Amino acid sequence: MRTEQATGDWITGNAPNPLLRRTPPNSAEAERCVIAACFDAFKGFDELEVTLQPSDFYSVWHRTVWESMVSLRERRIPIDNVSVKNDLKRRGVALTSDRETDLVLLEMETVPTAANLNYYARIVLAMNQKRALIETGARIVELGYSAGKVRDVQSAAHELLFSATSNRTAQEIVDGAQLAREVYDHIDNPNRDPGIVSGFFALDEVVQCFRPGEMSILAARPSMGKSALMVSLCASMIGKGYQVGIASLEMNRLQLGCNAVGSRVGVDTTRIRRGVFGEVEPGRYDEELATRERRLTLDGIEWLSNFGDKFAVFDGDVTSITELGRVLERMVMRNKIRFAAIDYMQLLDGSEATRGKGRYEETTEVSKGIKRLAKRLDIHVMCCAQLNRKVEERTNKRPVMADLRDSGQVEQDADVIMLLHRPEYYTPDKEDVQGVALLDVCKNRNGPTGMVRLRFVKQFTRFEPW
């Protein structure tokens, strides 16, 4: 009973929480140094590399002064203790004689160099980020006691934590000479990141490479083989030594593995999935063929096992961009992946805020979320996507970028868009299109566009360079 009573007191807040009695992280000295350096006499605003918001300051007084200084700068009014005092009065801030004296003292304080200014500015920002973590922790505790579904609570908690841990990047302006030095250092650096090549020569000639921090789209109508092409590209990349991850939202990992093995060794993937080899017709088997197919399959399994931790596969129940983010974070931490493939984009839902606004709004949020994930995790993310039915209404059946389903935002966010088309799907009797697959690189933010010709081996669900 004593334990229950103590627990009840803690939940209802009757017992004081020691965390609430502690002073939140802050540095009054760093805040004063930043403000002092940004009076016009020291030209600090011109050297500030970190964007500071008034809310970054812990002291209400410092926050109010900084808000006034930012306002004066935006209105091109010189910043000194007089202009700040007048602006504060205009805003209705009551100024005591002590506050007016403090403005004079702030203007008189000096910060030796811009390097010192930015050092102090980063301290101010770091203290605010710690305070944000404390506030986020308290809000997550509240979520834990809420009556919502576990999955929704987990998703909301992760979004809170993601917002609290997002880094605000420095705003650094460089001149042409420094930019030239950076370009020279880049081309002269043997350890520079050259991006990820697919191993499909014709595709690499157009796309050049899949760069970290970017998003590409591999889109097609159903049954065109976009999942098979994704697996073929991933297998080729792993063979070149890259760490690759696949988040399969449509296909379970056993099916994906069977397809990868069958595609590699040239055994019908349906036989591998069934575990039945050598069947030449229903109920009749060829023992020699069965032995050969089983041996090849075992070779393929060994080939797959040699990938080790270079290949990460996830086929769990993921429905939101927040959950996908957690999966990719784990792959980056555990497997050091540099390339992630998502199969497929339209299976992801938006947040609760967009769920009732229609599929367009949800897909827009998902597209932006995936692009942010690629940049934050510094990996390339390739998403399979469905095309709408307008393709079927055209005579030549060849897709165009406007056929991307649900949202035009995908066209804007993607750095590379590739549209897969197999003419034999629509004209199976024409001999000259048998096995022909056309991959239209219709958008490439960092290079040319063009048509890439591939070979599709239907029996083994495999794509090959032409």
Image (cartoon, rainbow, N blue to C red):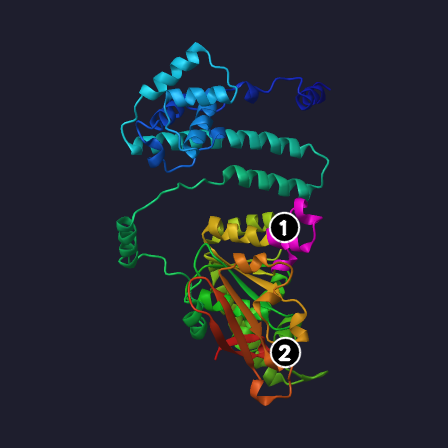
Residue type at mark 1 is Ser
Q: Residue 109 lies in magenta, yes or no? A: no
37 or 140, nearer to the observer: 37
Is 395 placed above or below 448 here? below
On the image, the x and y values in percent for residue 309 come to 48, 57
Per the image, the residue denoted by label 1 is: 320
Quadrant of the image occupied by residue 341 = bottom right
Read off the magenta span. Answer: 345-365
Residue 318 can be seen, yes or no? no
Quadrant of the image occupied by residue 254 = bottom right
The residue positioned 45% from the left and 59% from the top of the image is: 243
The residue positioned 44% from the left and 75% from the top of the image is: 202
Q: Is residue 90 left or right of residue 138?
A: left
Within 10 Å of disc 1 (Cα), the crowding (few <14, some 14-19, many 20+) is some
- Distance from the alpha carbon under mark 1 to that under mark 2: 39 Å
Residue type at mark 2 is Phe
Q: In which quarter of the image is the N terminus?
A: top right
378 or 151, nearer to the observer: 378
Q: Is mark 1 on a helix, strand or loop?
A: loop
Chief secondary structure of the magenta portion:
helix
On the image, the x and y values in percent for residue 152 come to 67, 43
On the image, the x and y values in percent for residue 204 come to 43, 70
Label 1 vs 2, first from the N-terminus: 2
Residue 383 can be seen, yes or no? yes
Q: Is residue 390 left or right of residue 48?
A: right
Q: Residue 295 carries which label?
A: none
Q: What element carries label 2?
A: loop
Per the image, the residue denoted by label 2 is: 277
Within 10 Å of disc 2 (Cα), the crowding (few <14, some 14-19, many 20+) is many
**Residue reaching furthest to the top:** 97
